[in-house]
Image (cartoon, coloured by chain):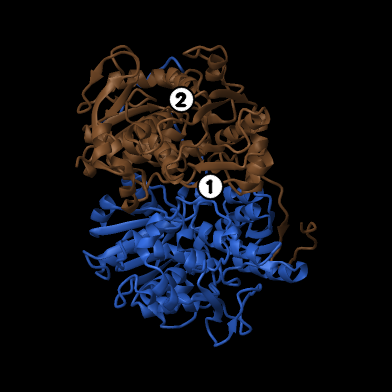
Chain colours: A blue, B brown
Amino acid sequence: MMFSYMTHLSCSKCSRTYNPDTVQQLCECGSPLLVNYDLKKLAKDFKPNELLIRNHDLWRYHELLPVQSPENIVSLGEGMTPLITMKKLGSDMDIAHLYMKDEGIAPTGTFKARGAAVGVSKAKELGVKGLVMPTNGNAGAAWSLYSSKAGIQAVIIMPGSAPAMIRSEVASAGSHLYLVNGVISDAGKIAAKAAADFHLYDVSTLKEPYRIEGKKTMGFEIAEQLHWETPDVILYPAGGGVGLIAIYKAFKELQELGWVGSKKMPRFVAVQAEGCAPIVKAWKEGKRESEFWPDSRTVAFGINVPKALGDFLVLQAIYETNGCALAVKDEDILKEQKNIIRKEGAFICPEGAAAFLAARKLRKIGWIKENERVIVINTGIGLKYMDNEEINLPVLQPDESIDSLPVLP
Amino acid sequence: MMFSYMTHLSCSKCSRTYNPDTVQQLCECGSPLLVNYDLKKLAKDFKPNELLIRNHDLWRYHELLPVQSPENIVSLGEGMTPLITMKKLGSDMDIAHLYMKDEGIAPTGTFKARGAAVGVSKAKELGVKGLVMPTNGNAGAAWSLYSSKAGIQAVIIMPGSAPAMIRSEVASAGSHLYLVNGVISDAGKIAAKAAADFHLYDVSTLKEPYRIEGKKTMGFEIAEQLHWETPDVILYPAGGGVGLIAIYKAFKELQELGWVGSKKMPRFVAVQAEGCAPIVKAWKEGKRESEFWPDSRTVAFGINVPKALGDFLVLQAIYETNGCALAVKDEDILKEQKNIIRKEGAFICPEGAAAFLAARKLRKIGWIKENERVIVINTGIGLKYMDNEEINLPVLQPDESIDSLPVLP
């Protein structure tokens, strides 16, 4: 049996195909490349219950990943994040079967570890020595740390307004970090020029074909954790939207393999912030692509992406699954985040809170039905966003004691 | 089959036993209580390969945990952290089989989630409405968040010098947080008084018998991840030392169950900082208990514990397994931490770095042999300790580009 069942790369828009044994970026037509596998052969060779004895990380699905030789795997133990029942929140929202796929419980604290693990492993396999990446922060941290482990030099370009903690994280990893007075699209232009000038692998979102394969494993895990049943709705906070595209690709592959039923797809929901909602706008207008969103801003830093290269793939996943796209307000995101911490003890990030808030709204208008199985992706730990504002706390001396306490519930 | 095979509580020093169906704190003699199970019966009823189909969290070992009814489980998806091969670091240290059990990949970002999950679940089962805890920070964060999920009111008392991020984390969870101008033993006295004054469950380290059971699952997982083989050496950064006591208890139980061989125990190493090394001092002097360490201080905040209630159990585990105890310098800890981030891409905490440093030293003097299987426990994510100092980074304008890059390796 082969370690990977990858066959070739194909363009997401035109009919061109590419060889995966050399470094590839975009298709000649300017569109992202996708990875193809020999699913028919794999369906014959392998049954999902053979997964049970494998390690609890995303490499358990190695036949469906692009790395061809196990010695190229660069792993920090990523994947197999928990799928947690949210009973109290679900009852609050009137959703009986509400789950959180908690991607905060991951190396580097976000789902970006998946893309970085597979992307960097494949870069190592292809002999890459240096790479460049524009990022809103968390992807930069993940790619920096995996690059360090792989011995690949990373150049990271990040808006200066990215959270301080993530800046420090990237710098600690030993990457070359540059800040830009602008948003991620400005960082992207600088990255493209640096890639050309210094012969670096440009690992901007979807400009390399492999991070999507890493993120795809979220879909495999959701299916495996639900004992190969397909959920009804998956809500995803969409910036570049690769996670959503990837989970959609995962379920398509699982259907073709026959590991899940072939009739039902989850309805995909792309959640954005009102201050940066290009995909929501495109969906409302029935368009196939989004337009650049000027002066974008939101507290959910990871989804501040004014124009995503893969927007048409996100929209396609929404249209083909009868999904939808929804924008929510920053102040409501922060309120929902606080509510979830206090009710469920889960210190999730604002992006995750945005997706939960969207679930609440979609249930209220009846788009989500009471007994549907609803999965919300929390993309990272809330800790990374903490501004460490000085909170006003009571301070005791060693010989003092607590005088009074609020009444217990 | 019973959900839990717990039978009773027994004193770790005298012969008294206690009923686990009501709230218990210390034994009448002032010593911690330990949980006992009917291991003979479990050995007959259950085989470890039956674990394969279970969820990838610590509740997969529920027969060996004290929670008697699954509906009392309060879970954020804790446990089954990865056991990662550290090839580059191992080759640097001349340890061919070096592994990291990465407890940073956990809810709340530290191994404290294990103790909190089982401790809070059992408190819920016992009908507890309010609890109080003195903490150096991370345990307080974990117990706060799990208490929120359980609907239990938590009062947390923490040295004012605890990392700012952890203070904010605890406060976000909605706990009653007090700072004390002192160290954890000062916080402990205030907690004891508050417990008496307000009828709170005192969940100070080892004053409640159940957190150790949660932490024990680290040992079960290490054994299961090594396919039920016993490693040669386990290094643990020891503050209160409960993690070490717990892993030792796990291997004793596994031996009695016959799930691992009965002849070999791992040698346990307690790692402390030179600025707070009461257990190392006691071990060097061949003593069974430690003395209070005055003016303790270390950058590895989690192991700044001047006198641990369970010191005698830590020392017992070391003596009985031919282990040892070792103190390391703060500046060397920080150097090793940086080395590990850059070499292995793992952003570990200073406590974890201290344990890796100890492995390096013990290999150098030949105490660890070249081909031994060595497990280092990283107790949490480094992120939580970041001071977000302003680093000096190059800032570009959107129309600028990168002029030069250091030569690629």
Q: Residue at x 41, y 83 (%)?
A: A286
- Decide: marks 2, 1 in contact (CB < 8 A)? no
Q: Is residue B274 positioned above or below A253 on the image?
A: above
Question: Mark 1 belongs to which subunit?
Answer: B
Same chain, labels 2 and 1: yes
Question: Mark 2 belongs to which subunit?
Answer: B
In this image, A190 relative to B245: left or right?
right
Quadrant of the image occupied by residue B144: top left
Q: Which mark is residue A146?
A: none
Label 1 crowd (10 A; few <14 / some 14-19 / many >=20): some
Decide which of B44, A264 is in the foreground and name it.
Answer: B44
- x and y percentages locating residue B207 in the rendered image: 34, 22
Q: Which residue is mark 2?
A: B240
Q: Which residue is mark 1?
A: B84
What amino acid is labelled 2 in the image? Gly
Label 2 crowd (10 A; few <14 / some 14-19 / many >=20): many
What amino acid is labelled 1 in the image? Ile
In this image, B243 relative to B153: left or right?
right
Q: Is residue B194 positioned above or below B231 on the image?
A: above
Decide which of A321, B337 is in the foreground and name it.
Answer: B337
Q: Residue at x 64, y 43 (%)?
A: B89
In this image, B125 relative to B379: left or right?
left
Residue A180 appears in the figure = no
Q: Residue at x 22, y 44 (%)?
A: B71
Q: Secondary structure at mark 1?
A: strand
Residue A329 appears in the figure = yes
Q: Secondary structure at mark 2?
A: loop
- x and y percentages locating residue A90 in the rendered image: 26, 55
Decide which of B262, A69 is in the foreground and name it.
Answer: B262
- x and y percentages locating residue B155 in the rendered image: 35, 30
Tell us which disc is closer to us: 2 or 1: 1
Q: CA distance from mark 2 to mark 1?
A: 25 Å
